[in-house]
Amino acid sequence: MTNTDFESITESGPLVRELRDRIARGGPMTFRDFMEAALYHPRYGYYSTTAGATRRGGDFVTSPDVHPIFGTLVAKTLLELWETMARPKRFDVVEQGAGSGLLARDILRWAHEREPSFATALGYTLVERSAAMRDAQERATAELDLPPGTVSWADELPLGIEGVVLSNELVDAFPIHRVVRRGAELHEVYVKRDGDRFVDELGPLSTPALWSYFDALGVMPGDGHYAEVNLDAIEWMRTVTRSLSRGYTLTFDYGYEAADLYASFRRDGTLLCFYKQSAGSDPYQRIGKQDMTASVDFTTLKRTAEDAGLATIAMADQSDFLVRLGIAESLVEVQDQMEEYFARRRIVMDLIDPALLGRIKVLLQGKDVGKGALPLGFRE
């Protein structure tokens, strides 16, 4: 159980007061609803107010923040997928959860500098509701001299996408239900007030979908163990499949297959909080000012997509994916420049370290694309 004096440590008083009043009116709320408010409240949520969080010196660092080489290698994969689709005149890349827009910027820059025919076909849409994040994305892409209409924004995934739905560390930030197993029973974690604190309280499952989730997997958390269930990821994958007319999804995220995610050694689940690049486990600190994530269940993600008509093509660790695409060549280019060589070597290691960013999973799925050759990043 986590107990925290929220008035003394939070920087988002209005959000705390709103959550306090909500609990006073309606009783304890599910952790999922608490996390949704903390991250996505339209005025006070973390992603509504922290446009700079994904930059170095912010609360966490994603792969695009480390170096443009990441976006370059993703762009090469998108080029391969375009070619596999027989080079359509219009190729949509729709990125959801684009953060500060660095990945979009680096993909577009590489395409327009290196592959003009691909760049001509490329239309890039960023799906973003947060005004703060959208401003950051507009600044990032404005650095490029792009033809009008190359970049656009949308509040939701558009229908009729022919190309690629791209996401980087999106699904692990969806609000999750927390559960704990006690014998043969599952209990859900709710959030209540205890004086001047937010605390956990166990109660009955808020929806039978939580029990059905584990029943479909054929696995359960260990007795006495906490675990997370990302029901929002299921609905998101169904929405992606409906939105994609023809093409691929390319998903980068932290996670595991279900057997590993709910393994007996994970007594406390995978929920993590990030503030100024320090990780913690207390979600009741700095409400609205810290990020929260939980590892993705790729078994459920793939099965949901397959049931909806999206085929699983391949999955790889980011470390293998980037090595196969030739990330080491960026070192060869500067091997005679000692200072630059060692600086870039640290960058490469950040991206492929299997204990850090390298353990991110890269999932490729397809719809009505036939059986073309695997992109280089997924080949053994």
Image (spheres, rainbow, N blue to C red):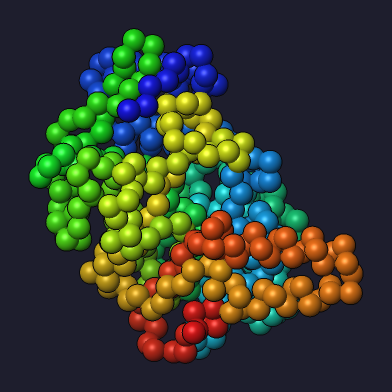
Q: Is residue 63 visible?
A: yes
Residue farthest toward the left in the current orientation of the protein: 184
Residue at (53% x, 30% y) in the render: 289
Taking the image as shown, residue 216 lies to the left or right of residue 42, namely: left
Relative to 298, does residue 332 appear above or below in the rendering?
below
Q: Quadrant of residue 180?
A: top left
Residue at (49% x, 44% y) in the render: 129
Residue 3: x, y in percent?
38, 22
The quadrant of the image that shows the N terminus is top left
Q: Quadrant of residue 58?
A: top right
Q: Choose between 1 and 149: the one closer to the eye.
A: 1
Q: Choose between 113 and 279: the one closer to the eye.
A: 279
Taking the image as shown, residue 244 lies to the left or right of residue 23, namely: right
Taking the image as shown, residue 142 lies to the left or right of residue 209, namely: right
Relative to 121, does residue 175 appear above or below in the rendering?
above
Taking the image as shown, residue 128 lies to the left or right of residue 226, namely: right
Residue farthest toward the front in the current orientation of the protein: 265
How many labels, in total? 0
Residue 235: x, y in percent?
29, 54
Relative to 130, does residue 116 appear above or below in the rendering?
below
Residue 331: x, y in percent?
76, 73
Q: Choose between 131 and 290: the one closer to the eye.
A: 290
Residue at (33% x, 56% y) in the render: 261
Residue 69: x, y in percent?
69, 67
